[in-house]
Image (tube, grey):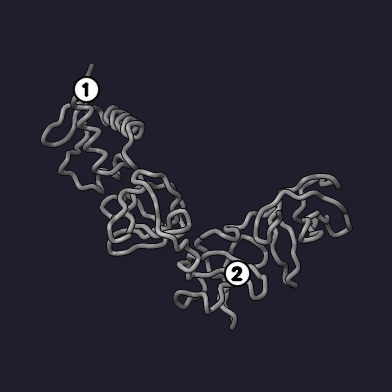
Amino acid sequence: MNQLGKTSSLEVVKQVPFGYYLNAHELGQVLLPNKLAPKDCQVGDKVEVFLHLDSEDKVIATTRTPKAEVGQLASLKVVSTSRFGAFLDWGLDKDLLLPFAEQAKPLEVGNYALVYVHINRADDRIVASAKIDKFFDKTPPFYKEGEQVDLVIAGRTDLGYKAVINGAHWGVLYKDEVFQVLKPGFKTKGYIKRMRSDGKIDLQLSRGSKVELDSQSLSIMIKLKQAGGFLPLTDKTDAEVIYQTLAMSKKAFKKCIGGLYKQQKIAIETTGIRLIEE
């Protein structure tokens, strides 16, 4: 089933002077303009296209990739405003409308907004909404601790970062466990750290598996060799300094140096860690 606001693989059924018509089945024959068609495009070819509406609200195809499809979240830049709302750059010639009624706060040109792309059932147009809560799954979350999930960063809070889990629920990444700047709209894998009794969900970017710890331990050994066998890092070192030096959390660092010490690969001194030459 071909859907408006989604990417589909469609067959070329007719060539005309201004482009190619594709068979979009229930949506009818859809135009792919010449300027967007692949080179040497021919009748019978299958073409990967995104279906959207042109300036006359007709379904049209493009080979360009939008920054978000219907049913997805993205942080998009406001490029203009009008009496209808704000228009967002989503990677296509026609900008995406974020109506005033769907804005979480007033927006100006140059601002970014985290939005959910959907089809307005009143007029079947593709629009954006910054009131993303209403598109979430209303059933209680049933995640397992340690489960890998897809995260979209929504913004900073006093606790750390607010994130959307699998496009359906809210969770929190705590600032003392995140050692990089996470911008709204950033997509990443994460893990369920804790399902709290108050219904809130704690998240983490790394679950500290053996494979991860082995990789981080190897990274410490490489850094030690590059530094001439000594690094001025201890369990008292500020977490941000550890992250800037080794790109890992303080918790992971402490686990790794403990393991390397037991393996007699490093010595832990009062001012840092030292490589033990074999």
Given residues 95 and 133, the one toward you in this image is 133
- Quick one: which residue is furthest to the top in this view? 278
Determine which quarter of the picture holds residue 24: bottom right
| Label 1 crowd (10 A; few <14 / some 14-19 / many >=20) | few
Task: Specify whether 98 is left or right of 194.
Answer: right
Indicate whether 51 appears above or below 270. Answer: below
Quadrant in which the C terminus appears = top left
The span from disc 1 to disc 2 (Cα, nearest Å) is 58 Å
Give amino acid for label 2: Val
The residue located at (65%, 56%) in the rendering is 6
Residue 170's x, y, as percent?
39, 60
Indicate whether 246 appears above or below 120. Answer: above
For label 1, the SS is: loop
The residue located at (58%, 57%) in the rendering is 67
Task: Specify whether 250 is left or right of 172.
Answer: left
| Label 2 crowd (10 A; few <14 / some 14-19 / many >=20) | many
Residue 142's x, y, as percent?
39, 52
Task: Report the residue marked by disc 2.
Answer: 127
Indicate whether 238 appears above or below 69. Answer: above
Of tags 1 and 2, which is closer to the observer?
Answer: 2
- Kindly identify which numbered label has been placed on residue 263: 1
Residue 271's x, y, as percent?
13, 36
The residue located at (39%, 44%) in the rendering is 147
Task: Specify whether 272 is left or right of 77.
Answer: left
Sooner in the amino-acid sequence: mark 1 or mark 2: 2
Given residues 111 and 151, the one toward you in this image is 151
Residue 233's x, y, as percent?
20, 38
Give amino acid for label 1: Gln
